[in-house]
Image: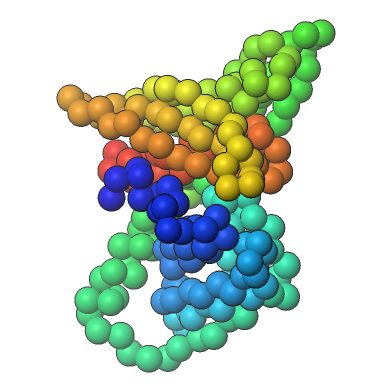
């Protein structure tokens, strides 16, 4: 799937785009058979309904939904809006294989864990990004001028540096990151090159600015690279 699949279509409203992206994310979680999100016209989530397999307990499913939406899309959801149903249905082998693939992919995907912004001395800022990969944590640190646009760039570069620490036969190069106004919202766009062997891929990721532009920059880089990253492991 191309990176452009992550962008809204001309016929799609910002609210519909947000719901589509969130539903795609939730259906990729381990043990989730289907997910449906009910949102109002502004895109505010009112209800989330997920159908899970028997091995996933409802409380764990709720936590997984909350964590995934926050880590990947920066969306906070009240747990009371999430309803979980379990099924004991025996699924065909093809469906089981697809679930196994989704489960393996979710374990390999990089997930945002923490962002720290500190001022080591006047006029300078240090940005530290921590990513989670399974049980392991990866960290990247960048320092530069303490200015709003610089902070966004540093957050994106620190994310790339964290990934670079562990990639042995591949690399990631940040092309650029920018916060723009679109669809009556602030959206962070990140462009990177994923280099593996003799192949180079131009990857684009997006994230709505909700918790701050620096965090949106981290999530936009992850949005751009996660599918490519799965191919490198």
Q: Is residue 19 left or right of residue 192?
A: right
Residue 157 in the image: x percent, y percent? 53, 23
Please, is residue 165 above or below residue 19 in the view? above
- Residue at horizontal 54 percent and vertical 85 percent from the top: 85
Residue farthest toward the left in the current orientation of the protein: 198
- Can residue 207 be seen here? The reply is yes
Please, is residue 222 above or below residue 173 in the view? below
Residue 36 in the image: x percent, y percent? 51, 75
Q: Is residue 140 left or right of residue 143?
A: left
Tell me the quarter of the image containing the C terminus: top left
Q: Is residue 21 left or right of residue 91?
A: right
Residue 105 in the image: x percent, y percent? 36, 55
Task: Name the image colouring.
Answer: rainbow
- Residue at horizontal 77 percent and vertical 8 percent from the top: 123
Please, is residue 16 above or below residue 150 in the view? below
Q: Quadrant of residue 3?
A: top left
Compare residues 90 and 17 and report the one nearer the observer.
17
Residue farthest toward the top in the current orientation of the protein: 122
Residue farthest toward the bottom in the current orientation of the protein: 89
- Residue at horizontal 47 percent and vertical 63 percent from the top: 20
Residue 220 in the image: x percent, y percent? 52, 39
Badge count: 0
Q: Is residue 83 left or right of residue 168?
A: right
Q: Quadrant of residue 92?
A: bottom left
Residue farthest toward the front in the current orientation of the protein: 11
- Residue at horizontal 58 percent and vertical 47 percent from the top: 183
- Can residue 113 be seen here? The reply is no
Q: Quadrant of residue 90?
A: bottom left
């Amino acid at each position: 799937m191309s990176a452009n699949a992550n962008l809204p279509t001309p016929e799609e409203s910002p609210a519909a785009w947000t719901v589509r992206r969130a539903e795609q994310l939730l259906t990729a979680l381990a043990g989730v058979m289907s997910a449906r999100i009910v949102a109002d016209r502004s895109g505010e989530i009112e209800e989330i309904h997920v159908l899970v397999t028997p091995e996933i307990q409802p409380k764990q499913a709720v936590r997984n939904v909350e964590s995934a939406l926050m880590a990947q899309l920066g969306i906070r959801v009240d747990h009371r809006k999430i309803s979980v149903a379990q099924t004991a249905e025996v699924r065909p082998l093809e469906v089981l294989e697809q679930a196994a693939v989704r489960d393996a992919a979710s374990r390999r995907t990089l997930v945002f864990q923490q962002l720290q912004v500190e001022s080591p001395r006047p006029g300078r800022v240090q940005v530290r990004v921590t990513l989670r990969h399974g049980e392991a944590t990866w960290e990247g640190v960048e320092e530069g001028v303490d200015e709003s646009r610089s902070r966004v760039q540093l957050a994106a570069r620190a994310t790339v540096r964290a990934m670079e620490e562990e990639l042995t036969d591949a690399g990631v190069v940040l092309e650029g990151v920018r916060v723009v106004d679109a669809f009556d919202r602030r959206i962070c766009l990140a462009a990177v090159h994923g280099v593996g062997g003799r192949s180079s891929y131009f990857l684009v990721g997006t994230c709505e600015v909700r918790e701050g532009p620096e965090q949106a920059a981290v999530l936009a880089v992850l949005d751009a690279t996660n599918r490519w990253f799965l191919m490198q492991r």
